[in-house]
Image (tube, rainbow, N blue to C red):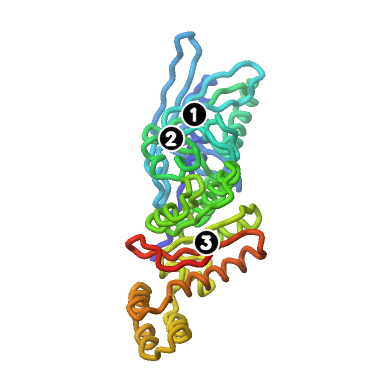
Amino acid sequence: MSELRRGWTTGACATAATKAAYAALLGGEFPDPVTIVLPKGETPAFVLALEERGADLAGAEWARAGIVKDAGDDPDVTHGSLIVATVRRGVAGSGVTFRAGPGVGTVTRAGLPLSPGEPAINPVPRRMMGEVIAELAAAHGEAGDVEVEISVPDGEALALKTWNPRLGIVGGLSILGTTGIVHPFSCSAWIASIHQGIDVARAGGFQHVAGATGSTSEAAVKALYGLPDEALIDMGDFVGGMLKYLRAHPVARVTVAGGFGKLTKMAQGAMDLHSGRSQVDFEWLAARVCELAGDDALSAQVRGANTASEVEALARERGVDLAGEVARRAQAAGRRILRGDGIGLDVVVVSREGEVIGRAE
């Protein structure tokens, strides 16, 4: 199997577009391809998809460059989007300032690394853009007072497929990236979103948050506790990542919700619930059934089952509260990660139909 192809973050694309646009504004041609230096020293080159110059009604010049984002083999919602930078000279002494153009969001809630009212252009991309502007300004004897507007033509629609609405980022996407590189199927971006969700919930004063493995369990736990969207964390498979962050950034109470199979793996001690990184142990489930019911025949059926959902159905038919036992053992495993009694931990097991079938509070 060939190695998966890596790609580039929106922040890297925005930086390259900014460099090309500022070079053109300073009287040169648009460099194409345009090369930038990433935080770890890599020097990728980007082909321009858009080159424009003009002036506003007051006669102030601007230059604009665009780059089509290539996320490599990662299933990124922004893959193929046009990342556009429009650069204008700023007020003397203003330094580099940023604006959210069409398709780039604005921060409206506390808890993110940017203040409310700021364009959703994260700190590392801002620093990268500031560095390319400083380099070009120095080479041309300019002060580097520049306004950078980043836009993504389809960004507002794409943002609805991201965490941005829940995080209070309105009007479009965030310009992201800490290394400039997108690694295919990387866990880091998801875990970073979990951290941001917790930060926003804490900043909003929420002392009960819930992490769910999917939309069905999220809907069930939201209804069960009457939680607002801001207190819901799209945990996915990364229960360990969520609990470790909460250990250092605590709230009074956290609920973990998921399907029987996922939470069985947590009950077994796994903290990454992805099917490629942890498996349901049917011998373990058979042992739990034996402890609960003393039914050797049922235990044998469990041992030979094909799926976790089949096991849960068999136990339920015989009146064995296996889902409740899974919830209790998952709770114990989660408490070991939290390391102490400062955070209350609930575990809720949810069926595929959205019914709560097991619970430990």
Provide the residue designation for mark 1: 100
The residue located at (49%, 35%) in the rendering is 14
Q: Amino acid at mark 3?
A: Val
Question: Going from the N terminus, do you reach mark 1 or mark 3 first?
Answer: 1
Residue 332 percent coordinates (x, y): 57, 71
Residue in the foreground of this view, choosing between 33 and 10: 10
Residue in the foreground of this view, choosing between 47 and 88: 88
Dot in front, 1 or 3: 3
The reply to whether dot 1 and dot 2 touch (C-beta < 8 Å) is yes
Question: Which residue sits furthest bottom?
Answer: 296
Residue 146 percent coordinates (x, y): 58, 23
Question: Which residue sits furthest top?
Answer: 58
The residue located at (43%, 66%) in the rendering is 349
Q: Secondary structure at mark 3?
A: helix
The residue located at (66%, 59%) in the rendering is 342
Question: Going from the N terminus, do you reach mark 2 or mark 3 first?
Answer: 2
Question: Going from the N terminus, do you reach mark 1 or mark 2 first?
Answer: 1
Decide: few, some or many residues near mark 3? Use Cα within 10 Å; few <14, some 14-19, many ≥20. Answer: many
Q: Note whether 114 is above or below 75 in the view shown.
A: above
Q: Amino acid at mark 2?
A: Gly
Q: CA distance from mark 1 to mark 2?
A: 9 Å
Provide the residue designation for mark 3: 239
Q: Quadrant of the N terminus?
A: bottom left
Q: CA distance from mark 1 to mark 3?
A: 33 Å
Q: Amino acid at mark 1?
A: Ala
Q: CA distance from mark 2 to mark 3?
A: 28 Å
Q: Note whether 337 is above or below 143 in the view shown.
A: below
Dot in front, 2 or 3: 3
Q: Give left or right: position of 282 versus 317.
A: right
Provide the residue designation for mark 2: 172
